[in-house]
Amino acid sequence: MESGKICRNVAIFIYENVEILDFTGPYEVFITGSDRGKDFNVFTVAENEQPVIALGNLSINPNYSIKNCPLPDILIIPGGWGARKEMKNETIINWIENVSNDTELVLSVCTGALILAKTNLINGLKLTTNRLAYNELEEVIPKSSELLEEVRYVDNGKFIFSAGVSAGIDMSLYVIQKLLGEQRALKTAAIMEYEWNKSKYYRK
């Protein structure tokens, strides 16, 4: 490893009825772009350590619970039907607020924005979500925040929001570019045989 080079912890929060591609898409991007684990340590975290049942009855064993999770450098909040329940879960909202104080980046995929909207973290930010959830998100965001439609992802600096499902892959590639350069991001997309959609995004 190069002198001074760090391996960032990438924590992906999962919960009951999480959308599968919302968390596996970014997971794939960060492990593929990690230079064989040198740049990113990617793991899942849930409220508890028991298996989590995602949409489609996919059972996932989280690597950690919120009680023993290593401090994330990057925290990813995916969406899914379960986001409507988790946005009312005070334990999770408090955990996100606390852990976000020390993270480098917080990423939202799809309706993960609904969960972040219930924290005290998004005042004055621009954000986006799945186009089918625009109305839901507008109802819960503070007046100081602005919902952007028809964009793939929105970069506020520390907080980055993506639109629905596959947009989380585009956002994650953008984050690879932001942290490690465009060539690393392009190489990651090429390894994945994925056509990176870099258009229609907002950056502060």
Image (cartoon, helix red, strand yellow):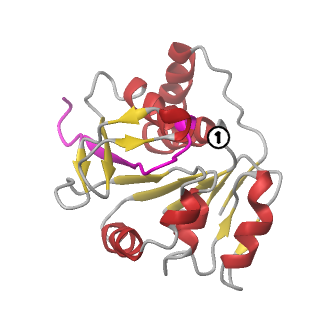
Q: Amino acid at mark 1?
A: Val
Residue 173: percent from left, percent from top: 55, 35
Question: Which residue appears farthest toward the right when viewing the image?
Answer: 150
List the residue tagged with mark 1.
165
Residue 12: percent from left, percent from top: 39, 47
Q: Residue at x 37, y 44 (%)?
A: 52
Left or right: 167 as drawn, with respect to 54: right
- Magenta span of residues: 1-21
Q: Nearer the viewer, residue 124 or 165?
A: 165
Residue 62: percent from left, percent from top: 29, 42
Location of the C terminus (image quadrant): bottom right
Residue 29's place in the image compared with 77, above or below, is: above
Left or right: 15 as drawn, with respect to 91: right
Question: Which residue appears farthest toward the bottom when viewing the image?
Answer: 143
Q: Residue at x 58, y 72 (%)?
A: 117
Location of the N terminus (image quadrant): top left
Q: Is residue 12 magenta?
A: yes
Q: Quadrant of residue 82?
A: bottom right
